[in-house]
Amino acid sequence: MLFCISPQNELIPVLAARPDLHRITDLPLHPNIPLDTHFPYSKKLQTSLEGKKLLFEEINVPLEEIQAHYLKGYCDYHPGIMKNNSKSICLRCGNKRPDFFASFSCARCKRACTYCRNCIMMGRISECTPLVSWTGPPTVITPCPLEWQGTLSPGQQYASSKIVEAVEQNCEMLVWAVCGAGKTEILFKGIEKALELHKRVCIATPRTDVVLELAPRLQQAFPAVNVIPLYGDSGNKLKYSPLFISTTHQLFRFEQAFDVIILDEMDAFPYSADETLQHAVSKARKQNSAMVYLTATPSKSWQKKCQNNKIAYVKIPARYHRYPLPVPRFVWCGNWEKLLNRGKLPERLLVWLKERLSKDKQILLFLPKIAHLEKSKSILKKLESSVETVHAADPHRVEKVQKMRNKQIKLLITTTILERGVTFPNIDVAVLGAENDVFTDSALIQIAGRAGRSDKNPYGDVAFFHHGKTWSIVEAGKQIENSNKEAAQKGMLLPEAGE
Amino acid sequence: MHCTFCLTSLRQVLNWTNLLTKQKSHLLCEECLSKLEFIKGERCSICSRSFANIDSQYKRGSLCLDCYKWEQDPIWKGVLDGNTSIFVYNDFLKEIMALFKYRGDHQVAGALADFFPETLAKERVIAPIPLSDERLYERGFNQAEAILDYTHLGYKQLLSRVHGEKQSKISRQERLENTSVFSAANIEGCKAQHVLLIDDIYTTGATVRQAAKVLKNAGAITVVSFTVAR
């Protein structure tokens, strides 16, 4: 789309290519048009656009209507790609890497047109692609009472009150809560406070599984708001809510939208490794806003930030049910990969599995690579008939996880894809090949954290079968024991909960 | 360097094999490359459809059932002299083509052009299948021309589109009856020429046959086509 400029210095979008027209990127900054408060603006456009920057193609409103809003000061147009001394920046995803831009001879602007490849899944942003924002009045948020009846553990209670403070004072903080501490419940009071103060909230996470798991729980806790989940195929990108739960990817579309962002699983892939996702989160915040980071396994650099008082933080070393975390056992099992290639599994693993199965326990077995899954499944079929495998690219992933929840599967063999975000009430956990690079210390802590989740079955067995202990294996064990020690010292464990 | 499709980093492992042998593709990672399915072995002598996973009821001698039907029809008999395709249009390639055409990731053409068999271009005039103006504006580029741009081979606009219905949105029957999608844009350029048509996907063969018919009516001697996927 190209623009011409009216005598009053207004931008007029034109769906054609003419030499007298300009690309949005090449236009100098144009003055804001003052808001005409008598203009009967479209609620639909406000709902679709508030706090976002979208492509014309994404908005389900005719161009003429958008332009009418622009002329009355309710919308504005922005470039998507900015060039600074021939270096390109994508203003949607923040991509700056020259190798993630490409250029083509564009049929729209009839010029070499640079576009961003990093966020192309959301539609192409090139030099002649404008982004549209809402500059009209914001939707007024109404308070919504919390309808959750449960009680918080002392650890949860403390963190919850700190989050309420952060929301009130627009602060940043980290909640370092062990796996099974009950992170979701910690958030409720803070969210209630935010809505009471007419603040817009987003819970962001790198993982779609987490969005799907949290959305119904939040909806239950806040029945009077329409909690909207946002992920790749959610089809909700034009909806408005004062309480979003979104993947970090979807935040590319937002700008200065939220008064409170709660980032869950901040150390999870791909957020931790992708600068553009980190950019997306900070771009989605309002200038004056609260930011709450949540994780069970902060990275080394975040742990250091905590120790050096660079960020306010709360640690919850105990689970909500006040039993200690299951401490993993390390079991040397020789060259298991060689055995597996010969159609066998280590004897020690088989003994462990048989014992669990005879006690009618459900088991999660983690392996380093997708290629290992089917091989071990065919061996374990002889031991237990209801065995399944699941990995990231598995089209039946959601169904299989549900079957495991329904106890229709007894033994689920998987990769690190299930290391976090999923909760099965009563399982034992094993890792085969714990020495592999994919099993970082935080991955192993998360995996161990799958066991003993419910208060009815607070104990679970965790075993790491390895062919040589790594730093990560030892570190994971150490951190889990430290958390238990800290919890005991602080009196957060039940008196009878000793192992 | 990054894989053109999935943007993962392409780190060359430094070993003797990599140093001494010419690598097939530097643009794609091993994983993406492994998901592409090359058309191999026996295939239809006109359209290159692989016979590998085809039931014998869909074959007629050296032809696939589709081409056999085309050749039975006096209007279409002998119109297309052959088609070369590189890949089976599997689920992975469908995703890649969606990224290329519908998301508009022009750079994908660079990786696809890498597989273009240059011998096909010998002594032939190359002509991309045109898009309608409406579609061209929507996508920002013509996918066939994008591929050609990366091969650095010269090409001519021999055709123009008469009306622009999205091929993927209409039924097979409608496509077969559609005879006036193209017109000759350059009759002089067709006369006594051997033409190579370029398109992204061969599905029913209707598009390339409609184009070939117009070119032959304008005087082309032979018309073959190249598509990335079949």
Image (cartoon, coloured by chain):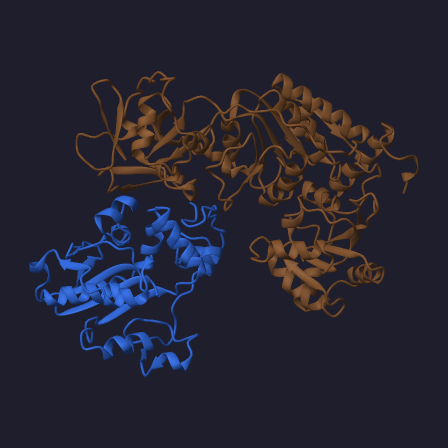
Chain colours: A brown, B blue
Residue A274 drawn at (x, y percent): 52, 37
x, y percent for residue A247: 55, 39
State the image quarter where residue B71 is shown.
bottom left
Quarter of the view holding residue B56 = bottom left
Q: Residue drawn 15% across and 64% down?
A: B214
Image vertical order of residue B48 relative to residue A236, above or below: below
Task: From the viewer's side, name the closer residue of B176 and B99.
Answer: B176
Q: Is residue B116 above or below residue A106?
A: below
Q: Is residue B123 visible?
A: no
Residue A452 position in % (x across, y down):
80, 46
Which residue lies at the image location 74% right of the left edge and 41% below the top edge?
A476
> Is A28 rendered above or below residue A457?
above
Quarter holding the C terminus of chain A is: top right
Does residue B177 appear left or right of residue A339 in this picture?
A: left
Quadrant of the frame with the N terminus of chain A? top left
- Counting labels gives 0
- Kindly identify the residue that appears in the image at 37 percent across and 77 percent down: B42
Q: Residue furthest bottom?
A: B61
Which residue: 46% across, 31% down?
A47
Q: Residue A38 appears at what percent x and percent y?
A: 37, 18
Task: Check the image and name the residue furthest to the left.
Answer: B188
Is residue A489 among the parts visible in the rendering? Answer: yes
